[in-house]
Image: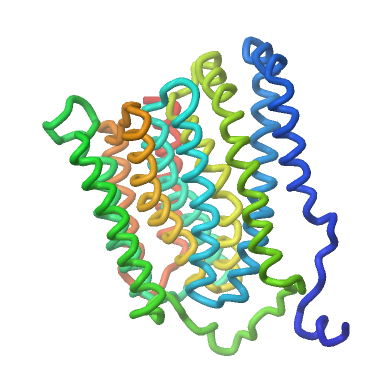
Amino acid sequence: MLMSKVLGHKRDPWWREWPLALAILTLTLALLGKGWIATALDQPVMLVVWLVVICGVILTAAIAIVRHADELAHRLGEPAGTLLLTLAITGLEVCMVAFVMSTGEAKPTLARDTMFAVVMLVLNGFMGLALLLGGLRHREQSYNLQSANAFLLMILPLTVLGLILPNYTRATAGATLSTFQMVFLSLMSLGVYSVFLLVQNRRHRGFFMMPEAAGEPAAMEAHSARPTVYHAVMLGLYGLPLVLLAKQMAAPLDAMVLKLHAPLALGGFIMAFLVLVPESIAAIRAAQANRLQRSVNILLGSVLASIGLTIPLVIAVSLATGRTLVLGVDNTDTVMLLLTLVTSMLTFSLPRTNVLPGCVHLLLFGAYLMLLFDR
């Protein structure tokens, strides 16, 4: 007992998994109360209340997923640990998008809007906040420049080919791709991400690691004494009801957009925000603790995983169901996307950061929110 406390380990009480019970209860009520929910869709107040409840449950359970993934990450070490945390959240996001896209009314732009929202939220919103808060506390922060370059080298072509190129192809009308082009893009996305995983975890692991700042003792963090298999199983148990809850969120979200005359892209923004907030909080806390390398691994890794895994999965869903998939963003979003990518490359062109790039990224995020609601 004493040794466990010295090593920073403690046994989690069983009631700490209450978010899982809440998610299952909410899903059960949603499945049993379909008639009541259908009635609520015609009442704006009830519609917003039900949507807030579902989003709150998903966010609460997603935080619990991050807790278990973070515990596994601690045991695996870097960079494999951060990769697991990223894949856990990205896998949830990708499954939610594919599930919602393949059921109910056709949503040809949902995947595109979600991927674009991920880029704007992470590279501008959460990254800007991490750099700003880290810079305010530590003035300047160091990270491994090779890691950021490796991430951006992969993010740039995947983002441009997936979200901009479809606007300029001639094989099909509009911002879509032909079947051959979709298959090629899917295989290329998987290939690029597979190569990155090989580099990150085999050949150049050192690119994504950095020793603690000299003279600063590592913080003693309390970790669970439960076995590794327990946390792995809990990841799966949390993930299933969340994906099914995402399906229940589709109809209220569509109804809210129509009744409140909200922008169509709001659905993708809400879905991206729900799954990204928990791990982004971990990244911001790491920056405040002067561990900017962990922030870079989490945030840039989530963008790369989201684009690299969402594209092939939604293309597979589109080909299997015969539903139209719109990938190309409009002209306004194209400008914002390119500006964000160029700014990110400039931000991570030097081995140290401060509050200045953080402020710039937050201003770009403000511009994205403005354009989301007012074109």
Q: Assign the C terminus to one quadrant of the image.
A: top left
Is 324 above or below relative to 243? above
Q: Position of residue 204 (x, y in %)?
A: 35, 79
Q: Residue at x 45, y 66 (%)?
A: 296
Above/below status of 23 relative to 199: above
Residue 364 location, quadrant: top left
Q: Which of 28 and 50 lies nearest the eye of the viewer?
A: 28
Is residue 359 shown to the viewer in this render?
A: yes
Q: In the rendered image, which quarter contains the N terminus?
A: bottom right
Give how far across and how far down residue 83 sits, in percent.
48, 66
Residue 83 in the image: above or below residue 58: below
Q: Residue at x 28, y 60 (%)?
A: 192
Q: Position of residue 295 (x, y in %)?
A: 50, 65
Q: Picture quarter containing residue 164? A: top left
Residue at the image position 68 percent from the left and 64 percent from the top: 231
| Residue with the most extreme right position | 1
Q: Position of residue 256 (x, y in %)?
A: 56, 20
Q: Residue furthest left?
A: 170
Answer with left or right where residue 339 lies relative to residue 58.
left
What's the residue at 63%, 10% (across, down)?
Answer: 42
